[in-house]
Image: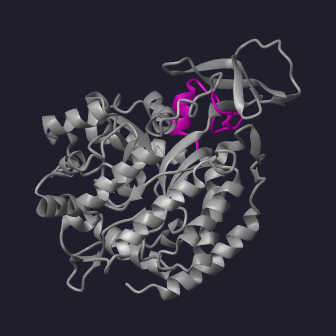
Amino acid sequence: MPTVIENGTVIAWNGEAHHVLDPGVVVFDGDEITFVGTDYDGPADQTIDATGRLVVPGFVNCHLHLTDTPFTKGHQEDVGSPRGPGNYQNYNALYKMLPGVRKASLPEDQYAGVQVALAELLLSGSTTIVELGYDFEIGGDGDIAITETIADLIGASGIRCYTGPRYRTRHYGADASGGVFYKDYPGDAAKKRFEACVRFCQDFNGRYGDRLRTLLAPGQIDTCDAQLLKDTRRFADELKVPIQIHAGQSPMEFSRVGETEGRTSIEYMMETGLLGPDFIIGHGQFMTGDGDVSSMAAHELEALTSSGTSVCHLPWVKARRGGVINSIQKYQDMGVRQCLGTDNYPLDMFHEMQCAAVVCKIVEKSSIAADCNFMFRMATVGGAEALGRPDLGRLAAGCKADIVFVRIDTPKAAPVYDPFKFMVLAASGDDVDRVIVGGETVVDKRDVKTIDVAAAVTRVNAASKGVWERLDI
């Protein structure tokens, strides 16, 4: 039953790049796009008028956290550490607030947070997300049944998702002196958690009409021993699922890996076999001692580029704490694959593209660094490539019918000289008014069809009070 989208400005894919068709036509049948062009005279069971809209591929948001984002919002900013500028931007967020909030979150709090986060993602045009699940010691003590319930909430929302509960050898936190402690999990607890995560990946991969897939998500690189990472690679190859690890989050992390492993973070990934076209480095800000990508050793750069590893940047979460990625343009020039994610709030890829572009221009002191076409590519095709999905992030025949309508009939938009510059430098998630995932309309006129948004917001507001009361930091 073909559906024809007509009269819109279409951001189409020609096999190598996004390009503009104005006006353009997109046709999909079931969950697959069958035609993209300017003139269509085939059958149509339904017609959607996209006048005054950009018709774009859905964003591929490659790194975020559903369960705790609503409860960390506003608690991690404008707070630092007395230990000096090098740690100021990261200490409170990574080593105090995140462990505290996660430990204080009961399962029902997490479920409330998930639904609010999913609604925000859909309303801002993310059609595919990569969700990094909670750590072992979060409220619920690592019970994989909580992850299973969350996976079902994700599936019911209509979004496309790669989800993986995290596991690690040890956890960290802030000590009484303003430093950081690392503590191994007792006995075989870490091993059992890893085995439970592998079973989850086996059991849930491909559910909800293949909209829900799984990935292996070892925790922060400084919390995983070499054997755990080698086992991760072995099972990822066996299950044919991707891997994502948190790495390059802070200078403390980079120093810790050097002290405990006697090598850099990239060398540690090389040694444990993680690098590959199915591997994503989440953050990628501090991959060298000075945080400058130009300082990367030649053998490290060669390993990243030849392996096809992707770096998923999360610029806003760092920028609002005084940090920058140095830089996206350098990674691009070096030929390293890159994608974008939101990490936590706001879960809006328009906002993330804007921050990525502007911060990079400031870092490079160049108006032409991180151009808007490349930013949009990172937010769509870059994420799809990182997941090994040539059928996502593009409007082209044979791709999934994951389609977003962006309003351009507004004072903010008019006139649209360059759709890419508008989307990256001026638009926001509030300009999205229709979202289609797998051929199904999940947002129409900013109404989320799959989630009772008002009820979800009420639940998360109530849940937040309990979480904040239980916080022990």
* Vertical side of 26 occupied by 330: above or below: below
The quarter of the image holding the N terminus is top right
For the image shown, how many numbered marks are present on the structure?
0
Q: Residue furthest front?
A: 238
Is the C terminus in the top left, top right, bottom left or bottom right quadrant?
bottom left
Rendered image coloring scheme? one colour
Residue 344 makes an appearance in the image: no
Q: Name the side, left or right, on which 270 lies relative to 10.
A: left
Q: Residue at 51% across / 31% down in the picture?
A: 421
Image position, residue 404 (x, y; %): 67, 38
What is the quadrant of residue 297 in the picture? Answer: top left
- Position of 68 with respect to 157 (left or right) is left
* Residue 19 point in image, percent of width and height: 56, 20
Q: Residue furthest right?
A: 45
- Magenta residues, start to end: 399-428
Q: Nearer the viewer, residue 8 or 417?
A: 8
Q: Position of residue 259 (x, y in %)?
A: 12, 63
Check the image and report above or below for 332 versus 262. above
Tell me if residue 423 is in the magenta stretch: yes
Task: Report the side of 271 relative to 204 (left or right).
Answer: left
Main secondary structure found in the magenta portion: loop
Residue at (51, 69) in percent of width and height:
68
Image position of 247 (left or right of 239)? left
Is residue 456 shown above or below 60?
below
The foreground one among 332 and 210 is: 210
Q: What x and y, as percent, mark residue 243?
A: 41, 49
Q: Residue at x 74, y 49 (%)?
A: 446
Q: Is residue 354 visible?
A: yes
**Residue 337 picture quarter:** top left
